[in-house]
Amino acid sequence: MNTIVPKVTTKFTCDTCHKKITVPSEGFVQWIQTDIGKMRFSIVHKVKRCFIARSSDAELSTMLSSTGILHLDSWIDPTMPNEYAVTDLESYWEIRRRLTYPLYEEAHLYMQQAIQDGFLNGYNEIMQYTPDTLQGIIDYYS
């Protein structure tokens, strides 16, 4: 079976204003240390009303490039000295999925509802993130 895997999105939803970021150059990935090892990650517009001052950030376009995965990996690599080392893996994996999993950015908007409704019952930790499953969530809830 030849399945065409969709590309990772370049359109995101701003976590502050909830409007679309249609071009990666209009966005940031920002992270705020909320506690030792705890980070709150978000994808936001590069405008003052969305962007939180005194956060750490990277250009969304950089995070979508080949060096973006290096940023992501450095945050959890125990062999690298890193002031941004992440121990809050739930937050880390959510931003990683949004940036790297095809269809996840759109599907994540409906994920909690899908879980509550039992849409993912019987799905293992891999199946719930496949393009077919994510497309099914999008189709059902959007």
Image (tube, helix red, strand yellow):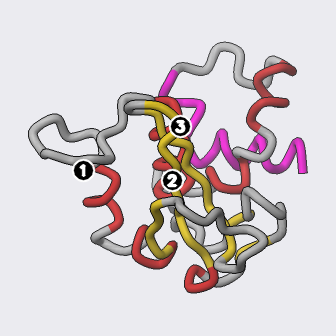
Toward the top, the furthest residue is: 122
Q: Position of residue 45 (x, y in %)?
A: 68, 74
Q: Nearer the viewer, residue 103 or 82?
A: 82
Q: Residue at x 77, y 41 (%)?
A: 137
Say few, some or many: other residues with alpha carbon within 10 Å of mark 3 (under 14 / 14 to 19 / 20 or more). Answer: few
Magenta segment, prevailing SS (helix, strand or loop):
helix
Say few, some or many: other residues with alpha carbon within 10 Å of mark 1 (under 14 / 14 to 19 / 20 or more). Answer: some
**Relative horizontal placement of residue 100, taking residue 98 as reference (left or right):** left
Judging by the rendered image, the residue that carries numbered circle 3 is 34
Judging by the rendered image, the residue that carries numbered circle 2 is 31
Residue 117 drawn in magenta? no
Judging by the rendered image, the residue that carries numbered circle 1 is 74
Identify the amino acid type marked 2: Trp
* Foreground disc of the pair 3, 2: 3
Identify the amino acid type marked 1: Ser
Q: Position of residue 6 (x, y in %)?
A: 55, 63
Residue contact between numbered discs 2 and 1, judged by CB atoms under 8 Å: no
Q: Position of residue 109 (x, y in %)?
A: 77, 46
Residue contact between numbered discs 3 and 2, judged by CB atoms under 8 Å: no
Q: Position of residue 122 (x, y in %)?
A: 65, 14
Q: Residue at x 47, y 65 (%)?
A: 57
Q: In this picture, is 128 found above or below 28?
A: above
Residue contact between numbered discs 3 and 1, judged by CB atoms under 8 Å: no
2 or 1: tag closer to the N-terminus: 2
Residues in magenta?
A: 125-142
